[in-house]
Structures are given as structure tokens and as C-alpha cells.
Amino acid sequence: MLNKYLFGALIILTALLAGCGGNVKVPVWVSDTQLDDAYYHAIVTVPKYDSRYKDQAFEKAVQNISMQINVNVDASVSTKETEAFGISKSDFESNIKTSSRTRLKNVELLRAEENKHGYWAHYRLNKHQYTLQRLQQAELGKRLALDLIQKYDQSLKEQSFEFMKSSLYLIKALDELSDLLDVDLNAQLYGYEVNLYTEALHRLSTLAAKTKLSLEPNQIATIMGSRLNLKSDVKCLYEGKPNLDLVGLRLKAAFSKGSGSLLTNIDSNPLGVAQLEIQSIKSADKNQSITIEVDKKPLLEQSDNPLVKKMISSLNFSSVSLPLAVRCPRVWVDYSHNGSSSECKQLLDNRLSELSVEVVDDKRDADYQLIVDLKSEAGGQITHLGIFSAFCDATISLRNAQTQEVLSSETIKGIKATAPSRAKAVQAVEPEALRVVNQEVIYRLVKSHILP
């Protein structure tokens, strides 16, 4: 009698060929074949729409045979460590069956027949040969994994810890072993018999637990703005006796509260230090923060095994947060009209406040200095209109208060005001000049040099 896998193949056969039209003649041997219990069998069929139909038949047979192979994962792998990774026994079994499709050898074609509609083929795999092949794979995998685990342990005895290189030892060991959990993975390690899988997994989880990050400085007071060039050193250590500098550890950084721009991917140098750089802060929130954590992407790229990738994704690395105390930029305004101060300065102050810039009275408290110098004079009379004119030149410059670097400097000439009398024209030209300065210059200065 056909087993359930072969019966399923015949159901698929009927479905595939039902649409071909007419009566499709199925070879008699498909249902009458006597199956030898010493083999795994797969009778498959494929339509001949594709020129690769024979390759497709073989691929189907390998998949079918892999599903027949009984996988019994040792209960010892269902430890608290595997459960902590979110890995179940069914995950292991599925992974073994999937991987076995690429490892199956000696699957032989016993019989085949085809007509214009379809191709039928009977494949088989010797059970004893498969078992021997599996044991050979296990011995090779154990030798490789044992060597990789010992290399990892040796890396912990160096003066610094090369993170990517050393973690690769464990990941490749798990790659070798995760497809072999239905066989005995015990071996001698330092004079003790251990399960190599649990040893590799324990080391990987310990690596994550002992990877520690710290910041210097661990908080920053700053202002909104661009080109800030704020920095904090992230110290990366493997916590042990003694502690080891972690070299080549990839970190990722992001605003967890607030917004701005920064270097999002950074690596630790030979001293175990990665430098976080904040280029700008865009949010006006007073309390913001940046989170720095281990980037798992480079680790995930080291494995092609979906089960090992799941383990890596579940690793519990620590992270650190950098609090930012943010305030608005402070500007001290040096304003004069014809060499004297004036109450009209309030027009400048109001415009700066509208743009989220704080105006301070003491220039020692300022981040920037804004110098606005107006020089005005009376004009002539426009006789045919019966009005008088006045003219003003405005010179505006912006400096960095700490370095005195001139960030911008420009002059607007010939700002004009008119009034029914000469005195009123002279009086009107100052606020008119400030209106022009506020409208044409102040916004641009703030957005170009003070705020992002």
C-alpha cells in the first residue's frame, strides 16, 4: 500500500493534470508499485509546461522524502536557554527537515515515464545509507564546532576582544549544529563531556549579557540648531575578570525623544570607544534623549540559517540613553540708530522671539551676537506730492558669541520713508528700516546660521 506521502502525490497528480483536457493515462505502476521498507520512497509527477520538468520532479521528491524522515530532537536541547531565545522543539524539527533537503545525497531515480501531458518518476533513498551519511555529517559538524568554541574561548584571554571575529566563531558553530539536533552532539571539552550545542548557545547569550556600554559625558546641555558638533564617547566593554575592550562593535543611535540629525551607525575603535556625533537638534522640547544600542544586523549577516538568525534576533544586549537638556539659542542684540540706542529695538526682539530665539540682556549669556546699525538722514521734498522723504542704510552682522566668528554680514542701502513733514519722515524711517530688516534678513539669518 502506498504511504500517506505517496498518496498525497497522487492527489496532486490528479489536480495538476485535470485541466489538460481529455483522459490522462496514468501509468499503472504508479499505484501498483511494491515499496521496499529499506528505502524512503517518493513517486511524483509534474506537468510538462516547463523545460525543467525533470529537475522539478527531483526537487519534489527530495522534499517529499525529507518529510518522511522521522526527526526526534533530544529533549536536552529544550533547556531554559533555548526557551529564553523563543526557540521551540517544533522550530528545531522544522529547521532540520528544511536543511536536509539541501543535504540529501544518493537519492536515486528508480523509474520514470512521460507522455505529452505529464512526467511521472519514482525516487528512493536507502535508509541505512542516509543514517550513515547523517552520522558522518554529525561527526564533521562536531569537530568544526568544537574547534570554533575553543577559538572563541581563547579570544576571551586576549588583551582586547574583537567582537565581530569572536562572535563569528559562535555563530558558525551554531550554524553547524542547528541542523544536527536529532543526533548525539556530546563531545569532550577541556576534559568534560558536554553538549556542544548548549555550550555554543550559552556562550552567545553570555556574550550579549556581558556586553556593556557607558557614556562620557553621560548627559549634554545644548541648544537647538545645526552644525552643533556635539560628541559623547561610548565605551564598549566585555564585563569579565578583567574587563576587555570590545573592538569593532557596531552600534546604532537614534533619537528616542525629540529629533535631530546624528551619525546613526558607529563602530568601536581599538580602545573600545565609539564616538557619537550629534550634528543638529530640530525639536524645541526641553528634555530629549538619544538611545545607543548594539546593531544586530552585522551579526545576522554572518549566518544563513533561519534558526540561528532567530537566536541572534532574540539576543538581549544592553543599551544606554544620552539625556539632552535643550534650550532655545540665545542672542544678544547690539542695536543703534545714528549712534544711539532706541526703543525701536523691541521690534527686533519680537521678531527673534517669533522665530524661537531667546533675546538676552547680558552678552556673556549669549550664543550669538546680532549687531544692527542704522544710519539715516532727511531727504528732500517731493513738491508735486507735497510730502517729504528720509533715507536709511542698515548694516547687519551675526557673530558666534564664543569665537567671535562672523557668520554673516550685509548692508541694505537706501531704505526710504515718506511723510507730510520732514520731521515725521525722519521719525518714520527708523521703524521702516527695521521692518525691512525683519522681513528680508532676520528670518534668513536665523534659519541659515542659528536654527536648522
Image (spheres, rainbow, N blue to C red):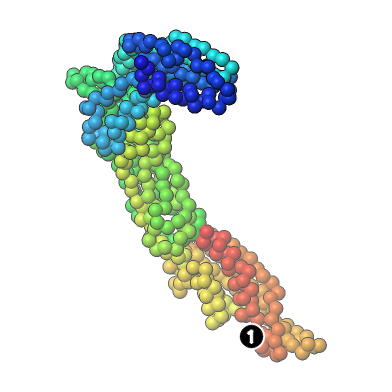
Whether residue 66 is visible here, answered yes or no, is: no
Q: Residue at x 35, y 31 (%)?
A: 307
- Above or below, 45 relative to 373: above
Q: Nearer the viewer, residue 378 or 75?
A: 75
Task: Tell which residue pokes out farthest to the right in this image.
Answer: 384
Between 143 and 444, the residue placed more toward the observer is: 143
Position of residue 158 relative to residue 273, above or below, is above
**Could you say which is closer to the camera, residue 202 or residue 320?**
202
| Depicted 355 relative to depicted 389: above or below | above
Residue furthest out toward the left: 192
Determine whether, in the image, residue 381 is placed left or right of residue 214: right
Residue drawn at (50%, 54%) of the image: 227
Q: Secondary structure at mark 1?
A: helix
Identity, as a three-letter code, of the amino acid under mark 1:
Gln
Q: With respect to residue 87, does 7 lie above or below?
A: above
Specify whether residue 360 is in view. Answer: yes
Callout 1 crowding tier (Cα within 10 Å): few <14, some 14–19, many ≥20? some
Residue 347 in the image: x percent, y percent? 55, 77
Image spot of residue 21 (x, y percent): 58, 24
Q: Quadrant of the N terminus?
A: top left
- Residue 361 lies, in percent from the top left, at 45, 74
Q: Residue at x 33, y 11 (%)?
A: 37
Nearer to the camera, 88 or 205: 88
Q: Which residue is mark 1?
A: 427
Given the current orientation, which residue lies at the most extreme front position? 23
Identified at 76% across, 86% down, the residue is 381
User: Picture coordinates of residue 141 (x, y %)?
Assistant: 32, 18
